[in-house]
Image: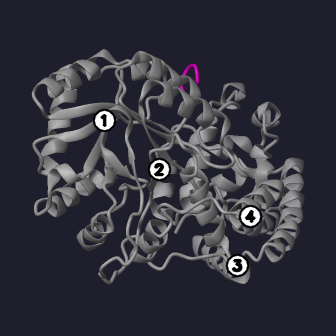
Amino acid sequence: MSKMKKGISRRHFLGGAAAAAAGVGLGTQAKLIGGPVVSEAPKAKIKEYRTLGRTGFKASDIGLGAGFVTDEALLEAILDSGINYIDAAENYENGQVERTLGKVMKNRDRKSVFISSKLGLQKKDTKESLKERALKCLERIQSDYVDCMMIHMPATVELMKHEGFHAAIQELKTEGKVRFCGISQHGSQWNDVPETMEKVCLAAVEDGRIDVMLFVYNFLQRDMGEKILRACKANNVGTTLMKTNPVGKYYMMKGLAEQIKEEGKEVPAYFDDLLARLKARANASDVFRKKYNIANDTELRDAAIKFVLNHPNVNSACLTITNFDELEAFVGLSGKKFDLKAQQALAAYTSVYGDLYCRHACGQCESSCPNGVPVNTIMRYYHYFSVQGREKSAMMKYAALDNSADACVNCTGHCEKACPYGVPIHGELTIAHQALSLKA
């Protein structure tokens, strides 16, 4: 059995994927990250504010995941719309996101906006080094304080309890430079003993030092999130969400799978099985789209956001906003109910595509992998690539991984056998590898 051919040109794949998306009416972004943008005052306004746990802050139900917002005009419009919860981090765009925040907030009431930032941790980090990095965040934001300083994606309970971090935060709280402490959680990232999002987050609630939490919850990834939301509610911990839209562009996946089949001399049997499943789902998708009058994936995305906003224990959904059209669309969902059409659309989508979605932050299959492939992380990067339009960033992140999905091609599929949701993850990892490792 020969290895699949890797020489798929980036231009050929992206061009074909775009054509496929257009053919099925999928929404496209009006502005790619880094492209030109025209400033305009937002028409839509936030309609609902919710108390962010024990912080007491009234946060907009639509928050901003500011990972890529370096356009001052866009950030001005975001704040003008009434969004007042901003999620940043020290490493977002090499600190440029925090610098943009600093420039825009100079002429605004600082107390009107809740700003979270995040520090990545390693076991070797000290209280002194972490405190210094936290103060650098404040310097970039041009603020005397940050509302919440989070641990960025602690992979284990041990890292969540990092005493150097908590000692630094306590000192910063005493000095009035940090008001609250939090964590963000994407799920397992592969370590000696992979730990799930549920395990880390529930331990964080029990620990008692965590005031705000950012984690994954959506209509397809409910199990862990429901437990975390209940625990946070019971302990008055603020809840903010990410990865609220799990709607994948499976037509894009199908197109790449077909291209791999055409250009590869030979492919493993598991890949044929995945391709057959993708083709069957594409046909079923056409049926439910017509039945429920769903024009494009934008409607499914909006239904997915309404779903999470409908949860009484959700304080704010942090959405990635990259242009003015997205701003209008997302803010327009503020205060909206999870109506019957949205419920029907998501139920139909689940019945068709539910078993193809690799649950964000799950990672339950990783301990079965003999090659140490970080399944959860790779599929998160593929989501950035295929759904969020963050192609360059996703490819750079993937290239930096110690272990890639290249090892999956000739594997017997330990991950797929361990998946509790029946996802054909073996083949999906192969597709993700092809997409994320394309050369210009």
Q: Nearer the viewer, residue 101 or 316?
A: 316
Q: Who's the residue at 58% across and 60% down the image? A: 337
Q: Residue 390 location, x and y as percent?
A: 48, 63
Q: Magenta includes 374?
A: no
Judging by the rendered image, the residue that carries numbered circle 2 is: 397
Query: Could you tell me how far apart the alpha carbons at marks 1 and 3 are, in whole angstroms?
Result: 41 Å
Query: Could you tell me how far apart the alpha carbons at marks 1 and 4 are, in whole angstroms?
Result: 35 Å
Q: Who's the residue at 39% across and 64% down the image? A: 46
Position of residue 107 in the picture relative to residue 414 (left or right): left
Are the residues flagged by discs 1 and 4 in contact, CB closer than 8 Å? no
The dot on residue 55 is: 1
Classify mark 3: residues with Cα within 10 Å, few (<14), some (14-19) or many (20+). Answer: some
User: Circle 3 — which element?
Assistant: loop
Position of residue 288 in the picture relative to residue 204 (left or right): right
Say how the picture is coloured: one colour
User: Circle 2 — which element?
Assistant: helix
Judging by the rendered image, the residue that carries numbered circle 4 is: 345
Between discs 2 and 1, the one toward the N terminus: 1
- Vertical position of residue 119 compared to residue 370: above or below: below
Query: Could you tell me how far apart the alpha carbons at marks 2 and 1 are, in whole angstroms?
Result: 33 Å
Query: Could you tell me how far apart the alpha carbons at marks 3 and 2 are, in whole angstroms?
Result: 33 Å
Name the mark nearer the viewer: 1 or 4: 1
User: Circle 1 — which element?
Assistant: helix
Classify mark 1: residues with Cα within 10 Å, few (<14), some (14-19) or many (20+). Answer: some
Judging by the rendered image, the residue that carries numbered circle 3 is: 295
Name the mark nearer the viewer: 4 or 3: 4
